[in-house]
Amino acid sequence: MAEPINYAVEYARDLANAYPYLSYFPEVWTGPNSQKYKPVNGKTVMIPSMTTTGARAVNRDHIDGVFNRNFDNEYQAVTMSMDREWDTLVDPMDIKETNQVVTIANITKTFNEFQKVPEQDAYCASKLAGFAQSFGTVDNTTLTKDNILETWDGYLEYMVNQRINRDRLIAYMTPSVYKLLKEAAGITRFLDAGTGVRNVDRNVGKLDGIVIKEVPSDMMKTIYDFTTGWVIGSSAKQINLLLVDPMAVIAPIIYDTSMMSPPSAQSKGKWLYYERYYYDIFTLNKRRCGVLANIGEPVVGTLTVTSVAGASSGESVIAVAEKPVLGQKLVYQLNSADPSITYGQDLSSWEDLPADGVVDVTSETNVTVCLVNTTKGNGAFAVAEGNATIVKAS
């Protein structure tokens, strides 16, 4: 029996060329970071980052002979979770009776166009919205034709203040939001009468230099069930708009197997096609501000908070499982009950949680810790919160 040939490398190359034609998010899937960072151990991707100190004034009159290490590097380890497979049998009689319509090439082409790539795009949108939610760059402004340009200006102001080059930004939006843009006062219309036919172009291909992409609303949800294909989750919310810097994300796609076995006794005379691949999307910890979303009703996330007795009388050590990234910090408040925190609430009045977690407690019985975003320009923008009963040293 002939051995199946693994076409994974060739298949991956062909599909990469097809992404600009099949996907609504080709800038993410084929972005520079997605090609740069690949798994180094199974499904684990190591994302390097580096920091340096700033320059200093030259001392022309003195050399101290001491040189310091003025840079540091670290690795962000992420694990790909979307491990997918697909297979099908093809009876040779089906190929003959359909005049070659039923072929492996046509079957896989249909699978890619109507199942695989749409699934990946739905996953992409939900993950990007999740990154924005967990970082604190979700806005719940209800967009209208009267406020969409003002809201848009606010989004761009934030991005530029984070030193993100607006020329790199891509705006993905639902058709309903795109419709609001076309109806907004201030959008320029073009009239071409050079051919003698009055053609009015109302397309909004770019806004303030940023490319606009329409994405079907069913592929812009916050939650999907990926058990088989992609199904919108029962509690999913509508993502209205995603503003993304492709340099802030990586989206590796790895093909492990793509092979076809000829008819055999084991397959009862049928061709057998099988492919296995895995993919995922991650944000770079130092560029999390490069993803912003407009979602109907963002909700505050959950932190895992614990309290143990400290070394000295009245001390408690507060620990939080979730760690802040660049642009975030942890704040806390001692209280008698868990306060009600809303997403985006300004918690500037709360105390910063010390790096060692040690706080002095008097009569309070509970501690509430919040993860806040410090890049929003309005103090401390609440993202997630957790509560624990205080345990202190007597």
Image: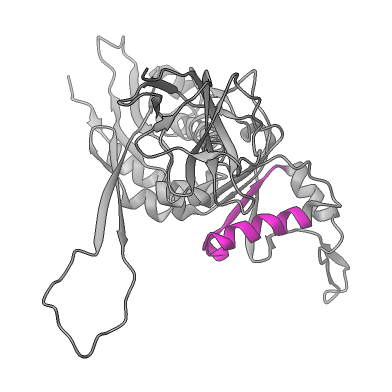
Above/below status of 239 relative to 206: above
Residue furthest out toward the bottom = 61
Q: Main secondary structure of the magenta part?
A: helix
Q: Viewed as shown, does residue 148 lie left or right of 1?
A: right
Q: Nearer the viewer, residue 317 or 51?
A: 317
Image x and y of residue 345, in percent: 66, 38
Q: Quadrant of residue 296?
A: top right
Task: Tell me what residue is drawn at x 39 percent, y 26 percent.
Answer: 315
**Residue 374 visible in rendering:** yes
Residue depicted at 81% across the width and 49% down the height: 180
The residue at the point 56 percent across, 28 percent down is 301
| Residue 149 in magenta stretch | no
Res 7 quadrant in image: top left
Above/below status of 253 relative to 259: below
Let me know if residue 135 appears in the view.
no
Q: Nearer the viewer, residue 169 or 111?
A: 169
Q: Quadrant of residue 230?
A: top right
In what quadrant of the picture does the N terminus appear? top left
Q: Could you tell whether 134 is left or right of 9 in the image?
A: right
Pick the quarter of the image with the C terminus. Answer: top left
Q: Camera-side residue: 186 or 391? A: 391
Residue 214 versus residue 44 in the image, above or below: below
Comparing 247 with 121, the one in front is: 247
The figure's colour scheme reads one colour
Q: Position of residue 312 (x, y in %)?
A: 32, 26
Q: Look at the picture and state if 168 lies above or below 54.
A: above
User: Does the magenta run of residues contain 171?
Assistant: yes
In the rendered image, residue 183, in percent from the top left (x then y), is placed at 85, 53
Q: Residue 2 location, x and y as percent?
A: 18, 24
Q: Residue at x 45, y 46 (%)?
A: 29
Q: Magenta stretch?
A: 150-174
